[in-house]
Image (spheres, rainbow, N blue to C red):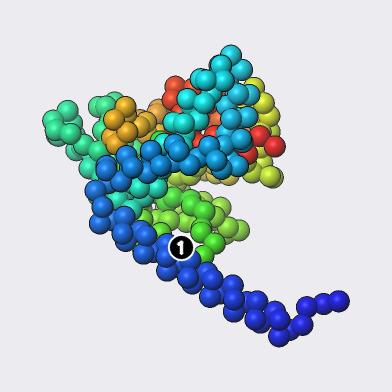
């Protein structure tokens, strides 16, 4: 038997009311977080998530992922990494409402004073080179430390970036996220059917495109990640193949105090070529994935092991 039209309408109204209520609370929480001291709140939420995280189902996923990726580590070492993952996640939540307030160094202030995010001169030189070239480039990053910050850095250093993001399901939350990010992250492009075209058009205009590339993508290409096969979204490789734009990695590392960051912009990644001379999609995604694996091995507690990357 089908569902009566009246019941469908009631269900839609209930869902709309629920989404509105959740959106209202989420927006209120973001506004409240902006009134707090970022570092104190991050310290507090980090401690809270260390205590709460082990009770959540994602904890089992994270432990299995870490144990498989690092078979030589003891259970105590795996638990220590996982505790750091929960701590980092709590800090990311606290930092989200303060992204537009993060301080970064200009070239003339590098090494003088304390900044929330700092770069070495070599990375600033690379930012300068990208900006001065007037040519488009592709940037990839991963869910490391606070993965929102690389887009903030691109905006701060006046690189015309177009950032691919996943739209929250609730409209009010999406609106709040867009409003909060709009002033400090360049042009935000929601993932969807038209996203590849919008990003390709941005590259044709000579702008930059950035995206996170370390999550499971059911229609992706097969690459090896920590010794196991995973599916990787090939979009960045497809855009590189289409436009011949250079591809660079960008990341941040959370420093030992938990509230400051070090950032890096890499040289262009050497991408394998197919027999016809064009970028090889699978080979390019393997090169990018291997770069990300190297980053994670340096700071394993700062990657989001809690999602099902291996399926």
Query: Which residue in the rendered view is the most extreme toward the right?
Result: 1
Q: Nearer the viewer, residue 179 or 289?
A: 179
Vertical placement of 194 versus 139: above or below? below
Query: Which residue in the rendered view is the most extreme toward the bottom?
Result: 6
299 relative to 125 in the view: left or right: right
Q: Position of residue 95 (x, y in %)?
A: 34, 46
Residue 125, quarter of the rendered image: top left
Q: Nearer the viewer, residue 32 or 165?
A: 32
Q: Position of residue 73 (x, y in %)?
A: 56, 16
Q: Position of residue 20 (x, y in %)?
A: 49, 72
Residue at the disc numbered 1 = 174
Residue drawn 44% across and 31% down? 84
Q: Nearer the viewer, residue 59 or 267?
A: 59
Tell me if residue 163 can be seen: yes
Q: Position of residue 267 (x, y in %)?
A: 40, 28
Residue 180, quarter of the rendered image: bottom left
Tell me if residue 283 can be seen: no
Quadrant including the C terminus? top right
Vertical placement of 83 versus 101: above or below? above
3 relative to 53 in the view: left or right: right
Residue 120, quarter of the rendered image: top left
Q: Secondary structure at mark 1?
A: helix
Q: Nearer the viewer, residue 63 or 275?
A: 63
Quadrant including the N terminus? bottom right
Q: Residues within 10 Å of mark 1 (few under 14, many from 20)?
A: some
188 relative to 284 in the view: left or right: left
Residue drawn 25% across and 38% down? 116
Residue drawn 66% across and 41% down? 220
């Amino acid at each position: 038997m089908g569902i009566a039209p009246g019941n469908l309408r009631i269900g839609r109204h209930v869902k709309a009311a629920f989404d509105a209520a959740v959106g209202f609370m989420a927006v209120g929480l973001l506004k409240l977080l902006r009134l707090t001291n970022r570092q104190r709140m991050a310290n507090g939420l980090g401690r809270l998530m260390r205590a709460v995280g082990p009770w959540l189902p994602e904890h089992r996923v994270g432990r299995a992922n870490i144990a498989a990726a690092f078979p030589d580590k003891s259970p105590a070492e795996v638990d220590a990494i996982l505790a750091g993952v929960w701590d980092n996640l709590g800090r990311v939540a606290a930092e989200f409402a303060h992204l537009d307030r993060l301080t970064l160094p200009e070239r003339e202030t590098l090494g003088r004073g304390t900044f929330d995010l700092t770069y070495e001169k070599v990375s600033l030189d690379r930012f300068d080179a990208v900006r001065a070239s007037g040519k488009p480039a592709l940037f990839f990053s991963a869910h490391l430390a606070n993965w929102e910050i690389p887009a903030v850095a691109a905006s701060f250093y006046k690189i015309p970036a177009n950032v691919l993001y996943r739209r929250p399901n609730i409209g009010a939350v999406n609106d709040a996220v867009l409003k909060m990010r709009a002033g400090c992250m360049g042009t935000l492009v929601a993932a969807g059917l038209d996203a590849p075209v919008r990003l390709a058009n941005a590259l044709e205009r000579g702008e930059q495109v950035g995206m996170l590339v370390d999550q499971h993508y059911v229609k992706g290409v097969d690459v090896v990640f920590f010794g196991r096969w995973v599916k990787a979204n090939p979009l960045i490789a497809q855009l590189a193949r289409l436009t011949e734009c250079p591809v660079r990695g960008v990341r941040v590392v959370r420093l030992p105090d938990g509230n400051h960051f070090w950032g890096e912009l890499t040289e262009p990644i050497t991408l394998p070529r197919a027999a016809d001379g064009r970028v090889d999609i699978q080979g390019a995604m393997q090169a990018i994935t291997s770069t990300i694996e190297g980053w994670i091995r340096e700071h394993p507690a700062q990657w989001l092991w809690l999602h099902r990357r291996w399926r």
